[in-house]
Image (tube, rainbow, N blue to C red):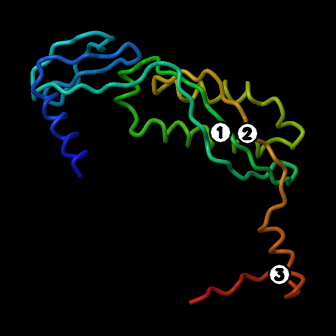
Amino acid sequence: MFDKLIDFIISIGKEFLPYVIIEQWNEAIMLRCGKLQQKVLKPGIHFKIPFLDSVWEATIITQSLEMNPQSITTRNGRNVVVKAIIRFRIEDVKTYLTTISQPHDVLIDTTQGMIREIIEGLTFAEIYGMDSLLTKKVGIFVKRWGIKVERVTLTDLASINSLRIIQNKNMEQQHGSFALPELMN
């Protein structure tokens, strides 16, 4: 509880300061009374009007995001599980901070959607070596948000038997045809 109080006091204290310090690995934008100022704040000290100016910072150096495993069916009907990492950096901080909300979530969702789209059009054998294709496609798409994709890497790739298929086969054997399980109350 005291940690929240201390965080609150620090944040109020920062509002009283007539300056803001942007660290070497960040860039920022300033809003005056809610309106975007045109200048991007580079690393260093910048003056502001307390309570009228707010500063939004973003880390611009290379970052990595690990994605959760996802199940996908290839073009030839093979079930695979893939896991990926995306390495990126921010090229245009103003666009990055003003065009998307929750940018890490958006980047993960976009990348996973593109992985699914590409893999569903390939056979299992064609999946190997698709990192450069993924990097190119995701990079082109997310450039509109001020993001530069350095690399998308599939870290795990496994062919699996889907439990759903196994369950469906067991149901067909028991019931003679496909039937949905009854819902429990």
Find residue 118 and name its label: 2
Is residue 182 positioned above or below 56 on the image?
below
Residue 119's x, y, as percent? 76, 42
- On screen, residue 4 versus residue 92, left or right, reads left
Quadrant assignment for the C terminus: bottom right
Name the image quarter holding residue 124: top right
Q: Are marks 1 and 2 in contact (CB under 8 Å)?
A: yes
Neighbor class of circle 2 (other Cα within 10 Å; few <14, some 14-19, many 20+) is some
Q: Is residue 140 left or right of residue 18?
A: right
**Between disc 1 and disc 3, whose residue precedes?**
1
Front one among 58 and 171: 58
Residue at the farthest front position: 2
Q: CA distance from mark 1 to mark 2?
A: 6 Å
On residue 171, the disc is: 3
* Precedes in sequence: disc 2 or disc 3: 2
- Mark 1 vs mark 3, foreground winner is 3
Residue occupying the point 83% across, 81% down: 171
Q: Are discs 2 and 3 less than 8 Å apart at CB?
A: no
Picture residue at 57% right of the left edge, 39% below the top: 110
Say which amino acid is labelled 3. Answer: Met
Residue 62 position in % (x across, y down): 53, 21
Q: CA distance from mark 1 to mark 3?
A: 33 Å
As helix, strand or loop, the secondary structure at mark 2 comes to: helix
Cα–Cα gap, marks 2 and 3:
32 Å
Q: What's the mark number on residue 114?
A: 1
Disc 3 on helix, strand or loop? helix
Q: Nearer the viewer, mark 2 or mark 3?
A: 3
Relative placement, left or right, of 143 versus 18 is: right
Q: What kind of residue is marked 2?
A: Ile
The residue located at (63%, 42%) in the rendering is 112
